[in-house]
Image (spheres, grey):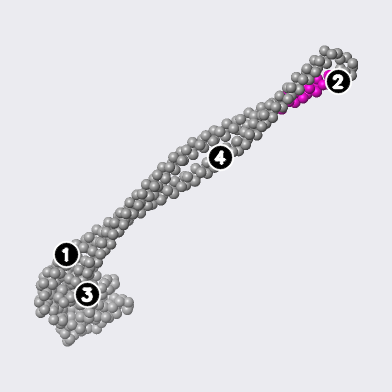
Amino acid sequence: MKPFGSVSDPKSLFGPLILQFSLLATLSIGHPLFGASLENSRERLNQTLTQLKSLDDWFENTRSELDDGQKEIERQDKSISLLNRNLKTTGLNLTKTKTAISDLVKSIDELTEKSHAQSVLIAETIRSAAHVQNRGFIYTMLGQENLDDLDRLAKYHGYIAQARIEAFDRYENTTSELKETILRLELERKNYAQQLSDLKTRQTTLEIEQKARNKRNKQIHASLVEKNKEREVLDRNRKRFEELIDQITQQEAQLSDPKLYSGNLVWPVSGNLTHQFGDSRAGGRLKWDGIFLTAEAGTPIIAAAAGVVVFADWLRGFGLIAIIDHGEKQMTLYGHCDVLYKSKGELVEVGESIGAIGQSGGTTQNGLFFAVRSNGKPVDPLKQLPQL
């Protein structure tokens, strides 16, 4: 083992990936990529099943709500149909009212003209009566009247008086009819205004009903689409965790030998320690949850203890990374490898080569990120590694 070097600036080492390393603080069996605990995986499966049960309850409630919604839609459809019929009836009534108003206006014009003609006739009758009366007076003054003339004048007087009475009666009838027609016109106009107001109110109500129905339909369909997607995700999670449990069960059987893990580790690489567990990084906002060992590219990386490789692939922020399950809910992680020699599911012995040092994952130095997880929680690797 080479002497440990001084701690360098963590920002220059990890650059933009520094925040992603904080995710390792929460590495636990619950995530499928780091699942190595049968108990925790079963717990996650139970959580997923609980979520699925909750989702099934939601669908059951939604089906009931859909039934209620269909009843509400039926009510709204019938209401809209009734409003449409009322609108049609109101439209017909408005047409009739407009026609009646037009007829009344025409009648008023005719009655006005008739009233004017009758008033002229009355005036002429009055003038005729005055003329006959004046003639009788003149004849009397001159002493030239005789009985025949007086009788004739009396008859004329009677005719004129009767004509005047009849003219007055017709005029009064016409005037009375004109007043009634004007009143009817006013009532029809008020009725028309009320019908028009009712029509606008019903149209507004119809628009509100239609918008409410459309909104409700969209809400129901959107909820169903969203929940169906959620259920698909949960179903995939359930299958994934069931597969993981089967896999871990097999691995647990392989790791049942107590000799695989004794609580002590060997150094995974011969290099310089540049970052220790708990060191500050990202300007003090984060802490290291593992150690970083720098070494030349290609330096071999060995398993710190015997176990089963449960993950061996590229992972964003860590490059090529291997995770070994040592049993007893213990795991070790090896990140930023240049190459991995082991695949998922393979058994490894303590000290067996599993990869080589590199800069994968975007690091600026050749080195290895080494971390230990106990019961899914990060622990200080230096407490389990031999001291120099």
Visible in this render: residue 114? yes
Secondary structure mostly seen in magenta is helix
User: What residue is shown with label 2?
Assistant: 137
The reply to whether discs 2 and 1 touch (Cβ–Cβ < 8 Å) is: no
Q: Secondary structure at mark 1?
A: helix
Horizontal arrangement in the rendering, residue 42 relative to residue 209 (left or right): left
Kind of residue indicated by mark 3: Gly
User: What residue is shown with label 1?
Assistant: 243
| Quadrant hosting residue 174 | top right
User: What residue is shown with label 3?
Assistant: 376
The N terminus: image quadrant: bottom left
**Vertical side of 117 occupied by 47: above or below:** below
From the top left corner, tell me how far across and down residue 35 is, in percent. Answer: 19, 70
Q: Secondary structure at mark 3?
A: loop
From the top left corner, tell me how far across and down residue 112 is, in percent. Answer: 66, 30
Task: Give the residues in magenta.
Answer: 119-136
The residue lying at 20 percent from left, 73 percent from top is 335
The C terminus: image quadrant: bottom left
Kind of residue indicated by mark 1: Glu
User: What residue is shown with label 4?
Assistant: 191
Label 1 crowding class (10 Å Cα cut-off): few <14, some 14-19, many 20+?
Answer: few
Q: For the residues marked 3 and 1, what is the alpha-carbon distance in whole angstroms?
A: 19 Å
The residue lying at 12 percent from left, 69 percent from top is 250
From the top left corner, tell me how far across and down residue 352 is, in percent. Answer: 10, 76
Kind of residue indicated by mark 2: Phe
Sequence-earlier tag: 2 or 1: 2
Q: For the residues marked 4 and 1, what is the alpha-carbon distance in whole angstroms?
A: 77 Å
Horizontal arrangement in the rendering, residue 175 relative to residue 263 (left or right): right
Q: For the residues marked 2 and 4, what is the alpha-carbon distance in whole angstroms?
A: 59 Å
* Nearer to me, 167 or 27: 167
Mark closer to the observer (3, 2): 2
